[in-house]
Each structure stands twice: as C-alpha cells, then as structure tokens.
Amino acid sequence: MEKSFDVVVIGAGPAGYIAAIRAAQLGLSTACIEKWKTPEGEYALGGTCLNVGCIPSKALLESSEHYERAQHKLQAHGLTLSGVAFDLGRMMKRKDQIVRKMTGGIAGLFKKNKVTWLQGQGKFLSGGTTWKLEVAGDKAKETIEAKNVIIATGSRARELAGAPVDNLMVCDNEGALAFEQVPKTLGVIGAGVIGLELGSVWRRLGSKVKILEALPNFLGAADESVAQEAWKVFTREQKLDIELGAQVKAVKRSKKGVSVQYLAADNSSKTLDFDRLVISVGRAPNTEGLGAENVGLRLDAKGFIEVDKNCATALPRVFAIGDVVRGPMLAHKGEDEGVMVAEIIAGQHGHVNYDAIPWVMYTMPEIAWVGKTEQQLKAEGVQYRAGRFPFAYNGRALGRDEPEGFIKILADAATDRILGVHAIGSLASELIAEAVMAMEFGASSEDIARICHAHPSMSEVMREAALAVDKRSLNG
C-alpha cells in the first residue's frame, strides 16, 4: 500500500519545515521529503540555511567579532588584554554544535507535531485527482500519494562561468564556512550579503581580503544613504578592500592558489593571486530533478516556479514557496509563505504582506531595512518626508562603544504613513522589527514618535528618527 498524505512538502529548509509543521498543526496528515546529508553521510533537516547558510555564518560572525573586540575595542572600556589568540578548530566546532542543535530541534518538532520525515530526493511522477511522488533515498525507491504538494526545494549558490567550485581552492558559501586554516589572502567575487559577511569574518581573523564587485554601485538594493555609510565604515574604518566595476574574465587554479583576471572599471586588465577564492554571485533555484516535466509544472527562464500571489502554481493543489519562487531569497519570507499556504490548504485565509518583509545584513555594523528606499520613492514620484537620527547621539550606543550609523524613516508627505525604514548600526537586525510591525499595522511616523521607548536604549534612535520626520527630534 502506498502511503497517502493530505500534504507532502518537498524540502525541509525554513520554508518547508515551517509549512509542514503548520499543516500538521491544522490537523492535516503531513510528510516532508528532504535529501540533505551532513559530511558524515547522515540525513539532516534545515536545508541550506541551517546547515551551511544563515545559522553557521552567524556563529562565525559572532566569534570573529569577539576576537576583533578583544584586539581593538576593549581598551576603550579600560580593559587591557595581552596574548589574544583564537583557535579556529574550536570556532568551527562551536559552529557545528549550534547547527546540530538546530537541525536536531527540527526533528524533535516533526515528532512532536506528527510530521512524517521521508529521507531522500522527492520527485513528481504523475498527477490527477491526487499526486504521485517518488522518494529516492538510501533504501529502495518509494512511491507516495499526496492530495496537496508544497514545493520548498530552496536554492543553491549560482555558478560563475569558467570557475567551477571544488570547495577547496574555489569555494561557495559552504566551503567558505569550513576553512581548516585562515588563508593569508582571500578573494571574494561579489559584494552582496554573503560576500560581505564572509569577507568580514576572514578579514577579522587575519586574512587580507579583496572583494571584486561587477556592479558600479555598492549595495544597490539598499537606500543610498545607508550604502554610502556602509562604504565609509567598511572601506575606510575597517580597511575592507572592495573594488567596484570589476568584470571577472578568467579564474585559474594552481597548486599554490587561485589567479583571477578581471577588467577594472577603467578598462585596464588586472590579475590578482589568492590562497583561496569565494564566489558569491547570487543564488539559483533548486528545481532540477523535481520531475516538473512529468506533470507540466511551469518554470520561468531562470528556473523559478511560476506562482500567483498565494504561491499557487497552475497545477491544482500544488504550491511553491521560498527561494524557488519570485521575491527576495530570505528565510523569513519563505517561512511566512509556508504558513500562508498551509492555512490556505486547510481552508483558512493565509496571507503574506510582501511590503513588510525586512532585509538584514549581519555585517558589523548591521544593516537592515523594510519598505521603500528614497530612490524608489523618487522614481515613483511619491511625495515623502524623511527623518534621520544617528546612533552617535544615543547614550546606550556610546556606552556600548558602537556609535556608528543611523536610522532613517520615510513617511508619506500627506498622510504621514510610514513607507520605509532604513538602519545601519549595532543591533539593526533587532531594531527593524519595530518598523516592520509599524508598517504592518499602517502606522504613521507620529505613532512611533508618541510611543514611550525605554531610556537608555538603542530603540530610542527609532523614536528620534520618527520625531525628525516632523523636524522635532529632542536629542539632536
């Protein structure tokens, strides 16, 4: 007898495992197919994010930040340390322990919520009144039946032509999180989120890092004022070497390292040699091997699954969420889509407000934003008012010795409704949550300005930025 489920989720990354848990909570018999294996050959839940992405990178970012503070920042607090050193092996072990705890926690949640974990590659076989799926794992292939299918197969690092990744000399995010020793020189192709975060980690631990970015502008998706502040902090204060307008032409490997030939912004040809190279030029959806052709599942030219506003595909009772569909490749966006789809399948009114999804870069200082940038509002002809307040005027930020950056609020000129909030500074990833909630409930800048914020706290900068929209900030 084939196993039959109300819902089968293909993929157990943040989008998939959340969708499976929510479906099970709603009383639907649910299974989740996942093929991920650890380097030891054991099946694991959590996908790229928990295994080789969001979670391990934040662990290494934290460790490297502690090391840099001990070296350069504790003197301001009257603390003098000598012989500061780090053990890379212990750092990596700590990172791996956190990953195991998190992925093991998902397995516990599956058991608690009665989600069946099917280990192996999931693939469509046929469709009709129900969907036939194949699960190909270490054992014999298994065919299961599903009334509803949620595709959450995630994404992988995008390849750079002529530079195949071996995760030894030429690495993607997975390899860059597992160096056994700190490279003396490290090249990074791509100055996006992954490139900046991983470049920052290894720079703090002693690598001479060079980041090559093809685009002429730095952090083009961010608000221009935030990008300008980030450029100043990263390049001038932290001495992170970033070159814009660099078009990579060739990558060659040798026993000693990696050679990168590129065309600079001034059209001159340059060649740089590195011990290791990290390629971070975006991500591509994982839709190969899904059996899309067996059931007529539509993909666009880039391999993304075509869906409507509710993440429904053109096939009946088949949904797709997370990195395999349109929109930002953010774990929390995929999680919200997973909840929405599970609730729709259960007959409820699931919903995701795509205008209130926060973006975060876990550099030091952190960068976070939600809503529209100033350049977007100008391009759309929207009349707005802007309020900005620096962390340098905040007592808590000064006490933490983290005065860099600011928060900026953009509000509609006529209604005062918040249209966007942009932050660069310590704890920006946490502070942005207030802005997300404000936008979700249609708040005005006056609403935030009238809310009592604890003193002294970093959150006061949010209130002062809201007051600044009306040119009445109290502390600056």
Image (cartoon, rainbow, N blue to C red):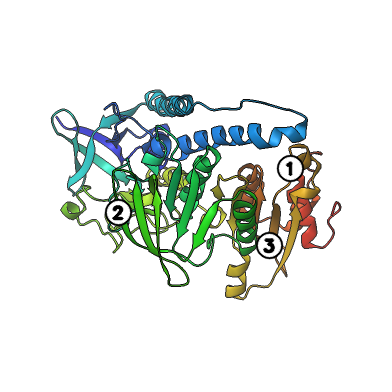
Residue 14 in picture, x, y percent from top left:
42, 39
Q: Is residue 105 visible?
A: yes
Q: Earlier in the sequence, mark 1 or mark 2?
A: 2
- Residue 193 drawn above or below residue 261: above
Residue 224 in picture, x, y percent from top left:
61, 64
Secondary structure under tag 2 reads strand
The amino acid at mark 1 is: Met
The amino acid at mark 3 is: Leu
Q: Earlier in the sequence, mark 3 or mark 2?
A: 2
Q: Image check: 97 left or right of 370?
A: left
Q: Image check: 107 left or right of 210?
A: left
Task: Name the residue located 79 percent from the left edge and 52 percent from the top edge.
Answer: 464
Task: Name the residue located 57 percent from the left edge and 46 percent from the top edge.
Answer: 363
Q: Earlier in the sequence, mark 3 or mark 1?
A: 3
Residue closer to the observer: 27 or 114: 114
Q: What residue is pinned by disc 3? A: 410
* Mark 2 nearby-residue class (10 Å; few <14, some 14–19, many ≥20): few
Secondary structure under tag 1 reads loop
Tell me the number on the disc at residue 149. none
Tell me the number on the disc at residue 458. 1
Task: Name the residue located 33 percent from the left edge and 30 percent from the top edge.
Answer: 44
Residue closer to the observer: 14 or 49: 49
Q: Is residue 305 visible?
A: no
Q: CA distance from mark 3 to mark 1?
A: 19 Å
Residue 304 in picture, x, y percent from top left:
32, 57
Secondary structure under tag 3 reads strand
**Which quarter of the figure is the N terminus placed in?**
top left
* Mark 3 nearby-residue class (10 Å; few <14, some 14–19, many ≥20): many
Q: What residue is pinned by disc 2? A: 252
Task: Name the residue located 69 percent from the left edge and 51 percent from the top edge.
Answer: 405
